Amino acid sequence: YYRESADLLVPGTSFSHIIREGVARGQYPEAAGREEEWIEERLANHANPSDPIEQQLANGRWLKVAESKTVDNYTVGFRVDITELKLALMRAEAASAAKTDFLNNISHEFRTPLSIVLGYVAFLRNVAILPKFKELSEAVGDVQPIRAKLDAFAQEIVSQAEKTDRSGKHLMGLINSVLDWSTLSGGHVELSVAELDLNKLLDSLCDEMADSAQKKGLQLIYSGQECIVDGDELRLRQVFINLISNAIKFTDKGYVRVELDQSEDSVVVGVEDTGIGIPRDRRTTIFERFAQADSSTKRKYGGAGLGLAISKNLVELHHGDVILESSEGAGSKFTVTLPKLRNYAVQVTADAA
């Protein structure tokens, strides 16, 4: 393996000399520009071996180096060629990065014109404020049956605009989900962590979503008490909006209950519904990206299947966890557990796959 240092690998040559001379001969590309620092690190690792290290050689090959001390204080080392594995991993990482860049770019390309479309649709939903329509309405006055026909025409425009608005917002939601997942899977997410009253957040969300529940004839019940946690309000809001809106979406009768409880070192939020439930064979995969209960669920309820994957990832970034309990046909309960005040770093790096 060590062609540049081959003549040094003979009995009696010290490890220190082999390493220093190897660096001088360009044997170790990773040492370039920080030679002395790299040599010190390598000698320290050799003197007190711990976990295996990966080492790139001048010829482009990669070795896994595992060293251990014997009872006589000698050092035994193994070198395993992992070049093919390393190259395969690098190709996979490059493909993943390219995928992430593509999703980011294409999502932004869709998002900008869609935002403009939704802006124009908002005007059509309020057709009576459009200058030309106001002129026409004033010209018609109270002349019947022209006035009735004009009002019916205006209502038809509003109705079609509302349908377009709903579809556009649904599409915008899908695009935002793709962007969120792309950000998470890119491997770096920054949390703006601050003290947060979780009770106030959940109470506010339930108030906002009560109308959606009432339209389906559902009870949206909330119970909780003041509870302060360290968290990113925007991201936790996103998590609980997803869980509560899912509960409402997949429940046709009964209730959705949100409960906040706490112990000495953690808080627990339960989101329970009396909806369709999740089949047993789908419960282990429901938090995976693009996962849904089954194909019929996707056809009936829509969605990209990213919401739960994003929510679980965001909760884990807060050092928390999400678990699922469900009975098919009888409802589901998602339980989010979060630590209380821990003052962990404001910037969190996500190692998301």
Image: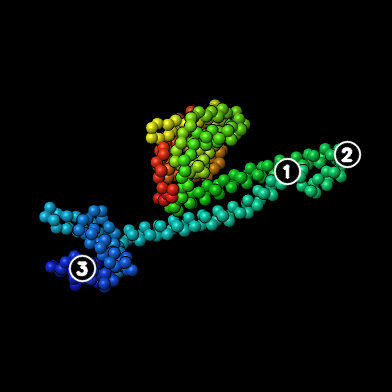
Residue 321 visible from this viewpoint: no
Q: Secondary structure at mark 1?
A: loop
Looking at the image, is 264 positioned above or below residue 159? above
Residue 38 falls in image quadrant? bottom left
The amino acid sitting under disc 2 is Val
Estimate the x, y position of residue 151 in percent, counting from the top left: 80, 39
Q: Nearer the viewer, mark 3 or mark 2?
A: 3
Estimate the x, y position of residue 37 in percent, counting from the top left: 29, 64
The amino acid sitting under disc 3 is Ile
Q: What residue sits 22% from the left and 62% below the top?
A: 43
Residue 236 visible from this viewpoint: yes
Q: Which mark is residue 126?
A: 1
Q: Secondary structure at mark 2?
A: loop
Check the image and name the residue furthest to the right: 143
Mark 2 Cα shell of 10 Å, populated few (<14), some (14-19), many (≥20): few
Q: What residue sits 27% from the left and 57% below the top?
A: 53
Identify the mark nearer the N-term, 1 or 2: 1
Residue to which mark 3 is pinned: 18
- Distance of label 3 from label 2 (alpha carbons): 101 Å
Identify the mark nearer the N-term, 3 or 2: 3
The amino acid sitting under disc 1 is Asn
Q: Nearer the viewer, residue 338 or 219?
A: 338
Residue 3 falls in image quadrant? bottom left
Q: Which mark is residue 143?
A: 2
Looking at the image, is 272 positioned above or below residue 289? above
- Verify CB contact (< 8 Å) between mark 1 and mark 3: no
Q: Which mark is residue 11?
A: none
Estimate the x, y position of residue 217 in percent, counting from the top left: 60, 28
Q: What residue sits 58% from the left and 56% below the top?
A: 109
Q: Nearer the viewer, residue 189 or 286?
A: 189
Q: What residue sits 56% from the left and 38% below the top?
A: 300
